[in-house]
Amino acid sequence: MNKSVDNAQSKSLQDEESAVEEDCVLKYKKNEYISDLFSQAPLPYLVLSGEGVILKANHYALSLLQISSEQLSLHNFADFLPAIDRQSFAHYLKTLLLTDKVIDCLVTLKLNASRYSVQIYATRDKLQNVCLLNLVKVTPLIEVKESLYQSKDFLASILNSLSAQIAVLDRHGMIITTNDAWLKLAEHSSLLVSRNTVLGSNYLDECLAVYNRFKCHEALVMYKGILAVLSGQQPLFAMEYFCHWVDDKFWFRIVVSSLKDSELGVVVSHEEITERKSVEEEIKSNEKRMRAIIESSPIPMALHDDQLNMLSINQSFIRLFNYDLSDLPTLEDWWQKAFPDHEYRQSIQASWYAARHNVHQLSDVTQALELVIHCKHNVYKTVLVSFTVIETQESNLYLLVFYDITQRKQIEAKLNSIFHAATDVIISYDISRNIVSANDASVRVFGYPAQELLGCNIGKIIPTLSKNIFDCNSCLSKSEKGIYQAIEIDGVHKQGAKLSLEMSKSAYSIDNECFFTIIIRDISLRKKREKQDLEHLKELAHVTRLGLMGEMASGIAHEVNQPLSAISSYAQASINLIKSNSLDLHNLTDILTKIQQQSVRAGQIIHRMREFVRANPKHISTIDINVLIDEAVSLCTTDLRDNKISVVLNFADHLPMVNVDNIQIEQVIINLIRNSIDVLQLLPANQQRLLSIDTVITDNHEIEVRIKDNGPGIPTDEQLKILSPFYTTKEEGMGMGLSISRSIIESHEGVLRFNSKVGKGSTFYFSLPINRLKKV
């Protein structure tokens, strides 16, 4: 029995020698154990700096090197080596400082006249960046080991220094020795806590008891595994199992290994791996969660390995491309099917590998590529592919995310086609007024190709565009943002010609940077035609006024005849007074005054008639609309009186002044009055004929004039044509009166409209803006 124990101890010491050395290194890192390590360690230990200077040595090392502790700082370890070994030892130290592993090497110590072959086992201390060396003489190593193996105290110290729970079983499964960690585990699990009661118990029986009591399958597997190692059927058994003690849950890993002589038994090691399993479970949970998210995501995703072969794809990927994993077993299948065109495939491969290189070399989180992918059913999709690297212990994985931008690209193509096909110039520029885009129409309007305008200041083609017209979008009020009303502005052609332009504009922002888009239309030809139309309108208006004067000729002649007859009568009376014997100067003065008044009246009538028919240029003046209506009514007094038409004037008080051409507006008023006179003539002689003229201020801050009659009204079928040129209901009319009137009102930025009901009369309305001067 004792021989078996000794053999087991020797085997355990041999198997755990490296663990002892590593434990010594760990103790060195803790200041409280440094003294014990160097005073109790049975082997020579040295602490070297990265340059090989001896920082510390224990008693055995000092004896081996034949120096005192006071002489340590004076020596480099290389001083004790022959010249031939110094270079290789320096390389050994450099290698040691770059790894966490224990590295050994064989050197020769040169001590006075003696030389010793020494095996060095060394590791580094990360925290202090020093090297811990264990020196072992090669010749007496076996004797040292045998003496150590025969030392039960040394065996116990080794076992108790280990954190794992260690027990040594004999060939029958009986526990013959344990360490302190095993007893602590037994105490925590409410098993036998005394070393004396644990020793001698049969571990195999304990496993069967646990299985029979709790039906624990792991206990049965453990029993069979230990039995297989004890019987020599297998050299090693290992498994992980779960324990639930009261409120605590633990995971353990058991390793059963045979001693050197299978007749001696086995070593059973239990190590708690709860934290590791928790991390693994969390990783698995996260992986399941990630896969669930990927699978349920509406965005196509694919997981690739380091060789870019597809490992998994989600349903969205299949729906988008109609490929599944059976279609794409290898990377070459993916390249061939997704990119059938050879040249395009080569360019995509180059871009892909460059992006992957950037991810690794530049530590970019993700890269994005725009690709055109050939789908399974001969359909092409434009996608934006972004990917990220998932680092694992085995290799790197690549998660690819595909964004389908096919529709967006189609819309962009349509908009781009519309953009360049538009006949109007479309230009965008930034807050610095530099042009960022222009369509092809720019060459037709300004003479500059679109590419030539990029980067130029907008003032190059529209010098009159002031900065304050288009302020920064962030400075605009809500009502000012968006699309603006078209304005007229001057531009410059590439050849220097002046252009008349109509321009509208909108402001927008991208990433908080303001941009402006303007749509420009060349209206130079239209302005020329408008000028010609205006001259033609003046001529037509003049002809119309002549026609009106022809219609009013008899009335005007009657009006002029009255003051002339009065002048003749007053002149005859004056002659009679002068010839009489009794000259009455007072009466004569009174008669001459009346002659003068009548002559002025006749002159005013003739002057107003001359001004009305004269083809004078448009002249804007500020007038009172009520006064202008009075004058127009006075020109029509004779016709109104002869046709027994009652006129009612309802003028609003304190009307603001208007800026108009008084002759043209007076012509409109007379046209409307004459039309009402013509329709009122159609009423029976015994029916009252009424004409009312009103002035009001509308809600739009405009002055509106209403001319209303109680005539027969306009038939419904004629109402749609009544304002058209050359349409008339009069036998001798030209059909230009209302058309010219509407043109005059619109040229003053007003509106002419009407409302008529058959049998109840008609009302014509026209509006004029207040205090707005129309420049022509």
Image (cartoon, rainbow, N blue to C red):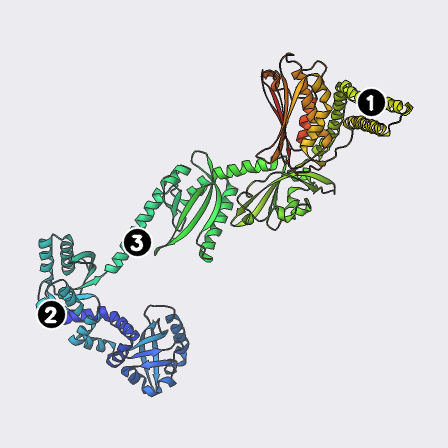
Residue for badge 1: 564
Residue for badge 2: 195
Does residue 12 appear in the picture of this structure? yes
| Cα–Cα span, label 3 and label 1 | 119 Å
| Cα–Cα span, label 3 and label 2 | 39 Å
Does residue 740 appear in the picture of this structure? no
Q: Residues within 10 Å of mark 2 (few under 14, many from 20)?
A: some
Amino acid type shown at disc 2: Arg
In-front residue for pair 570/642? 570
Say if 261 sits above or below 671 in the image. Answer: below
Residue for badge 3: 283
- Say if mark 3 contacts mark 2, CB within 8 Å: no
Residue at 72% x, 43% y is: 494
Mark closest to the chain's N terminus, 3 or 2:
2
Say if 675 sits above or below 167 in the image. Answer: above
Which quadrant of the figure has residue 107?
bottom left
